[in-house]
Amino acid sequence: MTSMTLSMLSREPHVITAGTAVLGEALDQQAVARIEVDWRPPLPGTAAALARVLADPRRERANATAVGRMVSARPMLVGVRPARDVLGLEPGTFLHAGPPITWERASGPMRGALIGAMLFEGLASSPKDAEDRLAAGSGITLDSCHHHRTVGPMAGLVSPSMWMLEVTDAEHGGTAYCSLNEGLGKVLRYGAYGPEVIDRLRWMGDVLGPVLRAALDRSGPLDLRALVAQALQMGDELHNRNRAATSLMVRELAPAIVEAAPEHAAEVLRFINGNDHFFLNAGMAAAKVSADAARDVPGSSLVVAMARNGTDFGIQVSGLGDRWFTGPAGVPDGLYLGAYGPADANPDIGDSTITETTGLGGFAMAAAPAIVRFVGGDVSDAVAATTSMYEITLAEHPAYQIPGLGFRGTPVGVDVTLVARTGVLPVVNTGIAGRVAGTGQVGAGLVSPPVEAFTAALEALAKA
């Protein structure tokens, strides 16, 4: 017996446990001191691709460059303009949330939103006429919002006559767009298309858009980075809770609204006041312009877009250009409105996961304990959701900080290799759309992205 063996037997053992919890629990029952290592095996089938990507000499510097651009972006709301002007949309062209999709594969809420957009643009005389024309496809063009520097919540429908928030990056020079938020209830973004939906869209085009444009012309650009940072410290997470951010936005714009359009000021302010999510769309455009600053860095494994079209969940990666990597969109697990339940829910939909892509939303739930009343769970779940995201991200945001975590920056910059190495998937909180066209919102909750999107991106990085 060696001296080392004798030494080990003469003192208390030092035990390190990893993996299956039952092993550690057995030691706990015997009062054996141990150190637990939170280790998980890599995602199945990814070992070879992961080794190749990790060996890429460009990766570390590329990721530092990409995430540095993302967190240094300075999004500014500079204007509100019609989509036909800023995006060059022609009649019959519609942008939608998520990866590209056809009418044949579109979900119920996506079809409902397209029907509503056809009616709004005067391209159909009835829902049946709109459906027939969309199915025929003649004179109709569908494309992803992301292909046009644009994002849209839920179905994300953008048509030529809709007014867009215009956000520029004062640091890197990019521009991004998002539609105006319609409010609550039966709305186009959730696939509703009744007369009240179309009437509201027309009022937004005739009154809301022009008033906001005039107000911004008078007030000057609105610093969205500063506003988001303040809202996080007031209990928002900037995806499903925007109450503080909306209030801050109104405080900034209200004087200019009154001065620029006194005849419409009351109805505009009343409309915004009735919708705590009004800021969401501005926040999405801010996140989009920040993520776009990190695009096209060769060798980078940073995720620059996560988006869903109600059928597919897709991601884009900085070092892989505009390619989409997809898997089936999952049905969120959460709380339902009224008599609705899981059977009424459509799979996940919307571009609003651009907030999680840039360290907000589900990644910042620890800043918004009240969010659990909307998406389910309790406060400890919200904290756990945020802390788990530090395992798969490249940085902590220098401006977006969480008071409850000692003002630690939100986890930002999802790395495909870290997802593969840990098996941890991004946390997403989201609204839930009814699966039948025309239903509207049926609830809200949490959803996990499909593993396939990340493994496919990893394989592509390995080949690149």
Image: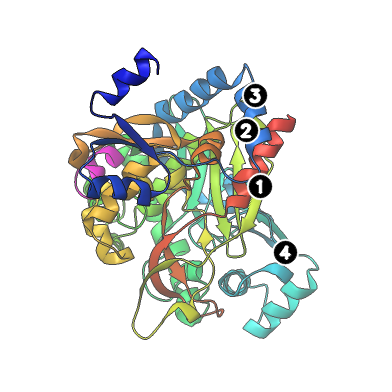
Circle 3 residue:
298
In this image, 132 relative to 202: left or right?
Answer: right
Report if residue 319 lies within the magenta region.
no
- The kind of residue on which mark 4 rests is Thr
Closest to the observer: 315 or 262?
315
Residue 341 in picture, x, y percent from top left: 42, 80
Residue 62 point in image, percent of width and height: 56, 21
Q: Amino acid at mark 1?
A: Phe
The answer to which of 67 and 285 lies nearer the viewer is 67
Q: CA distance from mark 3 to mark 4?
A: 31 Å
Which quarter of the rendering shows the C terminus? Answer: top right
Foreground disc of the pair 3, 4? 3
Q: Residue at x 49, y 76 (%)?
A: 434
The amino acid type, in three-letter code, at marker 2 is: Leu
Q: CA distance from mark 4 to mark 1?
A: 17 Å
| Residue 364 in sight here | no
Of the pair 54 and 121, the residue shown nearer to us: 54
Give the amino acid at mark 3: Pro
- Which residue carries the number 1 mark? 325
Question: Residue 102: which disc?
Answer: 4
**Neighbour tally class for label 2: few under 14, some 14-19, many 20 plus, Cα within 10 Å:** many
Dot 1 or dot 2, earlier in sequence: 2
Q: Position of residue 80 (x, y in %)?
A: 45, 48
Tell me, what colour scheme is on the image?
rainbow
